[in-house]
Amino acid sequence: MLVALGGNAIQRAQDHGTWAEAVRQMRRTTSALADVTVPGRELVITHGNGPQVGSLLREAELGAGEIPVPPLHVVGAETEGQLGYLIAQELGSALRSQRVDRSVLPIVSRVEVSPRDPAFRTPSKPVGRFYPAGEALSLRRRLGWTMREDVRRGGWRRLVASPRPLRWLEGDAVREVLEAGFGERFVFVVTGGGGIPVVRRRGRWEGVDAVIDKDRAAALVGRQLEMDTLAIITDVPGAALDYKSSHPRWLGRVGLEELTQYWKRGEFAEGSMGPKVEAGIRFLRDGGRVFLITDIPSLPEALAGRAGTRVEVSAPPTPRGTRRLGRTLPGSPGRRRLK
Ligand code: ADP
Ligand code: MG
């Protein structure tokens, strides 16, 4: 199972962004995760990083006279470290207290994007804080940033490109470890914040200033690792039709075709629920079997089919290759029970 943790699993809307708050919130999240880490189920985790990127960018801004401002891709790498550490600490403890013998391994993850992705011509993803008009226009002039006014929230924000993820570079290595039979020994934390976007130039990888949507990256990880289930954890109990109306209709069990119709009809907002549903559709078309959207308290019930939005396909449109759960090669380390 691949679990994608939304911002809320790490920092709630009312939080100030302190480390103590993050620990407290992650403790709730990881206790639910540990409950569902049962024998026969591999667990891989990915997560968002929006608020953390915002804080680091602000920090860099305030320190700019003294310390060089890092590029956005480096800030993304920093959040993978920070949140990978947090998840390792808290999930590690939660697993130990449930007597589950698995080590949590965060992986600094790079994700290839195309330098010709049209997203680079039309940046769409807001990052960082709100600026007053004067400052926004000066940033646009001095640094070439794309700035957009958000009239409702009274300020301007920087927009960056959100290119499509093509390949997670560390994915083959992680897959090898799973295939060697270690799937129930390690919990990998991967492509945090959607992964660090890199492009190939003259035979080398170069980081680029962009942000990959973490839900899109999750669909990619699901395909590369041939995961069976994708569970997207967010701050609402599922996806709803007529979400903005006074009578939202929460979706429970729904078919792939039906969900695709709703998605095409624009029931799920761009930049929030839309990419989650899109990721789910893609994951199932690429050979996944179960897709869930739920909040953290309902995760165990959602896995049992009693909560959340759930799409299940019996025969995936794209049958998969070789990877089998717990496949153990003769004499491979997977046969050893590590204590
Ligand atoms: P995350 O940090 O988990 O990625 P997002 O804010 O990106 O969270 O997405 C979750 C949000 O999507 C919900 O809080 C909800 O307000 C919003 N949303 C938009 N459209 C819908 C919909 N049709 N059904 C449910 N939630 C929706
Ligand atoms: Mg989001």
Image (tube, rainbow, N blue to C red):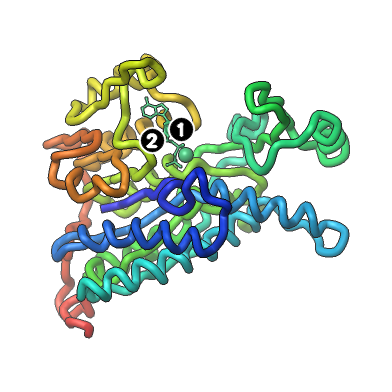
**Badge 2 is on which residue?**
276
Which element is circle 1 on?
loop
Which residue is situated farthest in the bottom direction here?
339
Please report contact status of discs 2 and 1: CB closer than 8 Å, yes or no.
yes
- Horizontal arrangement in the rendering, residue 311 relative to residue 16 (left or right): left
Residue 206 visible, this angle: no
Q: Indicate which disc residue 272 carries.
A: 1
Q: Any atom of ligand 1 within 8 Å of the CB at mark 2?
A: yes
Give the side of residue 159 with respect to residue 80, left or right: right
Instruction: Give the CA separation, mark 2 to mark 1.
Output: 7 Å
Q: Residues within 10 Å of mark 2 (few under 14, many from 20)?
A: many
Q: Which secondary structure lies at badge 2?
A: helix
From the viewer's side, name the closer residue of 136 and 220: 136
Measuring from the top left, give residue 279's x and y in whole percent: 37, 36
Residue drawn at x 31%, y 43% as measured from the top left: 295
Q: Quadrant of ligand 1?
A: top left
- Label 1 sits on what residue type? Ser
Number of disc labels: 2
Q: Residue 200, percent across and down?
A: 60, 51
Mark 2 is on which residue type? Lys
Q: Position of residue 85 (x, y in %)?
A: 48, 68
- For this rendering, which residue is in front, 145 or 49? 49
Q: Image point 27% across, 51% down: which residue? A: 226
Q: Is residue 148 above or below residue 198?
A: above
Q: Determine crowd level at label 1: few under 14, some 14-19, many 20+ residues with C-alpha closer than 10 A.
A: few
Q: Is residue 306 visible?
A: yes
Q: For residue 322, which quarter of the picture?
A: bottom left
| Viewer-side label of 2, 1 | 1
Between residue 5 and residue 281, name the one nearer to us: 5
Residue at (39, 65) in percent of width and height: 173
Q: Within 8 Å: ligand 1 and the Cβ of disc 1?
A: yes
